Image: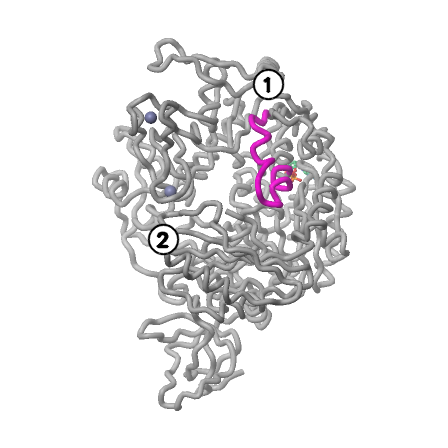
Amino acid sequence: MFKPGDVVKILIPNVVNTGYDYRLTLAADLGTFVRVSVMNRPYVGIVYGVGDSNLPPDKIKNTLEVFPEHLSIADLQWIQRMSTWTLMTPGAVLRLIVNVPDAFSAPRMEQLYVYNPDDKIRMTDARQSVADAFASNNNDAMSASDIQNISHVSAAVVRGMISRGILVPTTARSVETDFSQYQYRDMGNVTLNAEQSVAAAEICTAVDKGGFSAFLLDGITGSGKTQVYFDAAWRAYSRGASVLLMMPEIALTAQFMSRYEQRFGAAPIVWHSNLTAARRREIWRGVLHGDIRMVVGTRSALFLPWQDLGLIVVDEEHDTSYKQEDMGNYHARDMAVLRAKIAGFPIVLASATPSAETLQNVADGKYRRLKLTSRFGGASLPKIETIDLRENRPQQYTLPSDAADAAPRAGYLSPVLCEAVQETLDAGHQVMLFINRRGFAPIVQCKKCGWVAQCPDCSVGMTYHKHLGKLLCHMCGRTMALPDKCPECGDVISYRGAGLEKIEEEVSVKFPSARTALVSSDTIMSRQALERIVHKMENGETDIVIGTQILAKGHHFPNLTLVGVVDADMGLFGTDFRAAEHTFQQLFQVAGRAGRGDAPGRVLLQTYQPTHPVLQAICDGNRDAFMAADMAGRRAAKMPPYGQLIALIIEANKESTLKNFCAALAAAAPKATGVKIMGPIAAQIYQVRNWYRMRFLVAGDARAMLQPVVSHWLGCVRVPANVRVKIDVNPQNFM
Ligand code: ADP
Ligand code: ZN
Ligand code: ZN
């Protein structure tokens, strides 16, 4: 406890910050939230230690405000350990926690608007996105900036809707929800089967006992992992602890919400990136005050100011979206385990396709494996087969004669797959066609002179998006008009490769009477639009759904009996050592959508490599053998989890600056035993948004302490102003 007048170190949420000294105006603890002025700007920070500057006393400023709320000592240790591990500064870690502007001020007064639909006004896509944004926020009033942020539309769209009277200014401010009245109940309407009961009992015992323990809830798709961790969540919650259920954004489905509500008697409080500022603020404060004790959220929910956490569940623990790469690099699953270890409570990692890292922790006896081996209610696993494209060439198709372009087009659906689709439709069942590529065609080129449409700012090609009617850069989001002829030689433009819009076209010709739906992971696709499609699937209003990986998770369609993977080879030949693992996980998850009801499911993988070990393993359903082989390969190559990697990504807006700085860095490379430094090499994607990129890779064996080596190394060089250095500990992405 510090007294008024004590000089303490205050950490503020700022990348360059390691703590400044201030004099307390009120008593405070370690972790207490305070407001201080830095360069005449107010910041909310926390008391982080005893002051240690040698400034004369009259140069030390007073705190502006000392709040009654605080983080715990365990939280402070977590910030420290996370900083040591990720090489983010403690201030950068704190910024992940204190990320709600004005959380400690009175709610801001802003003009709010409500949505007032009018049938007479034409709904453009942009206007529909705005309508969806309202629907996904309970139709609460929103500020203009919220509307823009959540629906990704321009200010002009919002202004236009205001002037047409479909957005109406409201004087009524949204009232802050009083979460102290918010209580969940166990509705007691779920009876676990034998396997589920065993798993749930083990976790509940760990919850009762307290202290750190880690579980891998390893259950096949459809085995009911959700109900098992709901049991454990209820146990912790009913003991008065807080519970965090983490999942990838795309698994936050309406189906999940309604299952939660059925089990706990009220809708979950959900935390993700598309909330209004007011909602973020009230949830953040609700958690801080202990009024909210259970949240379902994406990776950033880990950084809410939790009080007395008693359980974390990381669902789909293998999912790559847990790795954050923009604002600091961290793996939310690993940081959640760290948090559980430091504060001493159990954590559950759930997956049908656990990551190699987690399986190794099981093998080492650090995590306890709980297995669910059968689908709930006796549904059988689908039969998985390959289609050899070398023998089953997809046939061309021609658009109807009234179409502008009636030349025959290359097909991507083989006769065998088409036959299976037809049989499924005839039986009155549903089909999913999976292709993990957005847009119509990834390559737009001139076959005469070789010209290829490229993003002027990034070293990647532009993808043609038919629905958008434009070329789109998947790196930076830049759009360009589709030229009507080759800009170099004037010849016709052609497309190569297939995206999902192309498959949609082929389906419309080959199955003209089928009702189809397209599901893309474009940002333009709102949660609401996705829910509409899911609804149609559930109600049997869609026969064929064509989608990217956004459909591969969390959905339960009992009448879906055929999954066709259009291009199973797509991920097989990646250059990074996780390519096989990720392809396996993705195809396994997609396959898991089939046959979840009474009718058995069937999965067909189109490939030119039917004997490839990844595809063979999927067909045999032999996950463990596949992962064992993959992990043996990694062990031999000393790749994670058997070795460690840290990537340095160096970016500069001038090539010469980049080269010079990388040369200086290479010259300063430390020599430490057991540590190898590779690079610099040009990054696979050399140019993004007009910045040039090079990479170093630091490798070491499992016991090496790479972080101190890297921070010492970076301490030896001065980083020029127009150079960015990103540190990626245990990188997942090698682009
Ligand atoms: P997983 O997450 O393992 O893929 P789910 O939790 O989605 O599986 O469960 C699959 C289906 O079985 C869901 O519809 C779920 O509600 C149902 N289910 C699972 N366990 C039970 C249970 N004990 N009682 C009733 N329904 C269950
Ligand atoms: Zn040309
Ligand atoms: Zn670009």
* Type of amino acid at the residue the image marks with label 2: Ser
Q: Which residue is nearer to you in this view: 319 or 175? A: 319
Q: Residues within 10 Å of mark 1 (few under 14, many from 20)?
A: many
Decide if residue 496 is on the left or right side of residue 385.
Answer: left
N-terminal of the pair, mark 1 or mark 2, is 2
Q: Is residue 322 visible?
A: yes
- Per the rendered image, the range of residues in magenta is 564-584
188 up-or-down from 699: above or below: above
Decide if residue 276 is on the left or right side of residue 236.
Answer: left
Which quadrant would the N terminus be assigned to in this image? bottom right
Q: Which residue is nearer to you in this view: 432 or 644? A: 644
Q: Is residue 424 visible?
A: no
* Type of amino acid at the residue the image marks with label 1: Leu
The quadrant where ligand 3 appears is top left
The mark closer to the camera, 1 or 2, is 1
Residue 521, position as x, y percentages in the image: 47, 37
Q: Residues within 10 Å of mark 2 (few under 14, many from 20)?
A: few
Q: Main secondary structure of the magenta part?
A: loop
Label 1 secondary element: helix
Q: Point out which mark residue 174 bears.
A: 2
Distance from Cα at disc 1 to Cα at disc 2: 53 Å
Residue 53, position as x, y percentages in the image: 45, 85
Q: In which quadrant of the rendered view does residue 575 lie?
A: top right
Q: Point out which mark residue 417 bears.
A: 1
Residue 37, position as x, y percentages in the image: 35, 75
182 up-or-down from 113: above or below: below
Q: Which residue is nearer to you in this view: 155 or 671? A: 671
Residue 315, position as x, y percentages in the image: 61, 47
Q: In the image, what residue occupies the spot 47% across and 29% down?
A: 499
